[in-house]
Image: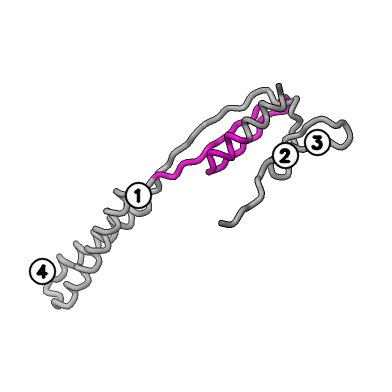
Amino acid sequence: MQSFPRMWDIVTDPQSGKPLLRLGDRYIAIGDILEIEHTELVERDYKGLLAMGMAFMVTSAIFLILVTDFGWRERFMLGAVVTGVLGMLSLYESATSTSIGFVELRISTRDGEELFTTANHDDAAALEFAVTGQRA
């Protein structure tokens, strides 16, 4: 498994020797951190699949009506079957979609707020532990 560098680290300021929290390209003095608010968010991305499923089902119904009521050729019934199957599979996939979870850390400082978001729960816990350990 490939390992990527962390987006945060505890470093020492070369001038003052005080610990700093590096978040990407920003640095926050550990002494300036007032509070860390931990929020876990969970989302399900199903709206696009649901919209496509409904579009395929409507298209299938239109094909079916055109073949049965308006005398279109029977070969267009294949279009109704294909779009109907695609619509049913899309609706099934939207019903069984899994959740996507991530952690949001809102770091309140004397100068404002910083937001750190990660999908790795262990990384967020390690960041909170490292900052609270440095503040103690």
- Looking at the rendered structure, the kind of residue marked 3 is Thr
Q: Is residue 30 magenta?
A: no
- Looking at the rendered structure, the kind of residue marked 1 is Ser
Residue 136 appears at what percent x and percent y? 71, 21
The residues colored magenta run 99-126
Q: Secondary structure at mark 4?
A: helix
Residue drawn where x is 23% and y is 68% of the image: 82
Residue drawn where x is 10% and y is 68% of the image: 69
Q: Is residue 123 magenta?
A: yes
Residue 64's disc is none
| Nearer-N-terminus badge (2/3) | 3
Q: Secondary structure at mark 3?
A: strand
Mark 4 and mark 1: Cα distance apart in space: 35 Å
Residue drawn where x is 72% and y is 35% of the image: 21
| Nearer mark to the viewer, of 2 and 3 | 3
- Looking at the rendered structure, the kind of residue marked 2 is Arg
- Looking at the rendered structure, the kind of residue marked 4 is Thr
| Nearer-N-terminus badge (4/3) | 3
Mark 4 and mark 3: Cα distance apart in space: 76 Å
Give the residue number, with chain letter if any, for mark 1: 97
From the viewer's side, name the closer residue of 119 and 70: 119
Is residue 114 toward the left or the right of residue 51 in the image? right
Magenta region's main secondary structure? strand
Give the residue number, with chain letter if any, for mark 3: 12
| The quarter of the displayed image where residue 17 is located | top right
From the viewer's side, name the closer residue of 125 and 110: 125
